[in-house]
Amino acid sequence: MAFSKTHPALARALAVRDYTEATPVQAAVLAEDTAGRDLLVSAQTGSGKTVAFGLAIAAELIGEADALGTAGDPLALVVAPTRELALQVERELAWLWEPAGARITACVGGMDPRAERRRLAMGCHIVVGTPGRLRDHIERHGLELSGIRAVVLDEADEMLDMGFREDLEFILQATPAERRTLMFSATLPKGIVQLAQNYQRDARRIAVAGATRAHADIEHRAVRVAPKEIEAAVVNLLRFHDAPAAIVFANTREAVRHLQATLQERGFAAVALSGELGQHERNLALQALRDGRARVCVATDVAARGIDLPNLDLVVHAELPHDREVFQHRSGRTGRAGRKGVSCLLVPPRSRRRAERLLMDAGIRPAWGAPPSADEIRALDRNRLAADPMITGGIAEEDADFAKLLLETRTPEEIAGALVRLWRARLPAAEDVVDPIESERRERRERPERTERRDDETVAGVWFRCDVGRDRNADPRWLLPMLCRRGGIDRADVGTIRIFDRETRFEVRADVAAHFAANARRPDEEEIVIVPAESLPEAPANERRGRGPRPDGPPRPHRGKGGPGHRGRRERGQG
């Protein structure tokens, strides 16, 4: 669908931006049978909904006139959950409504409220803001709503999740009853439906095709990575994809600071976004990304809500997100409005099961693989140099004399070598990384073969204990693989295993006991505590002696409280 029935002033703005075909949400909102009606729209972020509601409210604001009149009390109010999203909406509406002479004012937390009140007093046509700041201006009589003809709630479900229900109800009650109300939400939970019933009139519900599934334009990849090589893997992914803009997600402010410093040391133009930054610092960081002075943003989930960056082609999850919603929110920063994008989830071996559950919950089937190697990146660099406009663009007239001088004083090989050095000097160096699966296989091949022992033989060694026993369905068939994985040892290194009511004691070969103890102290998602045992109690009747069961025997599913059950098996990579 083209924008054939768009107001002429807004149509000119679309033409300048080369908008020729409407996205599904835009086509649905602009259909003939929706004209003038309240709308309840379920649509994902990145689907073009800002332009959709910007065009949809044109009839209420401008009607048949050629342009808007003199700015006075606002005619439309747009409410967004975060300041970043509100400022982004303001920018989108600014270019869309510029030919119509619209004056747009943003009112968001973190900005000077006195300056906002001055701008409101000078008059505007559209106000965009966050719930708390808008309510503050209304209560202080700085925002007059008597002339409001249209209200838009953008990402309404997120505003309810963030606790803004009371503020939203206050704002809606303060606007004229005959206003037009448009609600946009990624999902339609009970709270949104109730809000629509209370504050909309005969609303038309629109579910945009594909709104409930993950972004179709995102290529998902799960990257196996060694625990100590996460930063190196991030470096190589950024170098391999060479995206015009990329965002790297971490879970804490401290991790964001550390990762940004690491990337800057490697030569990346990187900025950070986290909750500890003020609005001015956030604005500077985002502007650096928009104008190309920075190409990498390291951010927490909270700070990155609502961000829409042009040319954002790559998302890297340096740490696993906490749940499916956070994962989809992160990945949804790319692959927006028809653009293609790549989302890379870094998965250390110990987090493999959790990552698989996360991806399954999100309905994602990613391509598994190792991080890009330094050799792969160097091969790409050769191709990129050959295609660089610096090489293919020809020689400018003002550079011809210098080029002639160089050819007279240096050989072509020397000049080419200098060019390569200069070109490579601006690139961060690729890191040497390993594929954890290949590394494990190589260690297995290089490990010296051990002589098989009979089942009735024991291994003289050091005794350890772990805090699972019969009360948690302890069984050697899952205990033995778990102990080997936690301690980084072989099955042949484990001797007698004795299971008691509330604990299990086991013997580890003396020459690997120190190595086992050091590895077993590290935290693990199964939360089984392994410590040295001071003494060995009397062996119970069901003592299990000798070497572990053969690997082809299935483990018994765990049914007790807190036990690892089938998760005790050695994790095997896929890819």
Image: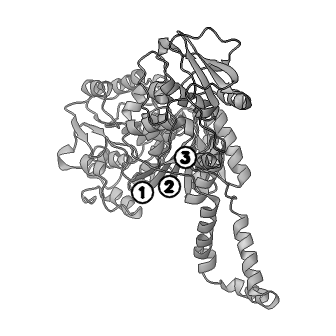
Tag nearer the camera, 3 or 2: 3
| Horizontal relation, residue 449 to residue 175: left or right | right
**Residue under label 3:** 224
The residue that appears at 37% across and 63% down in the rendered structure is 15
**Distance of label 3 from label 2 (alpha carbons):** 21 Å
- Crowding at mark 3 (Cα within 10 Å: few <14, some 14-19, many 20+): many
In the rendered structure, which disc, 1 or 3, sits on the residue that comes first in sequence? Answer: 3
In the rendered structure, which disc, 3 or 2, sits on the residue that comes first in sequence? Answer: 3
Which percent across, then down, holds residue 8?
Answer: 31, 59
Instruction: Please tell me whether residue 451 is drawn above or below residue 91 in the rendered image.
Output: above
Q: Is residue 350 visible?
A: yes
Tag nearer the camera, 1 or 3: 3
The residue that appears at 71% across and 50% down in the rendered structure is 264
- Give, as a three-letter code, the residue at label 1: Arg
**Residue under label 1:** 339
The quarter of the rendered structure image containing the N terminus is: bottom left
Which percent across, then down, holds residue 21?
Answer: 30, 60
**Distance of label 1 from label 2 (alpha carbons):** 8 Å
Regarding mark 2 in the picture, which secondary structure is present there? strand
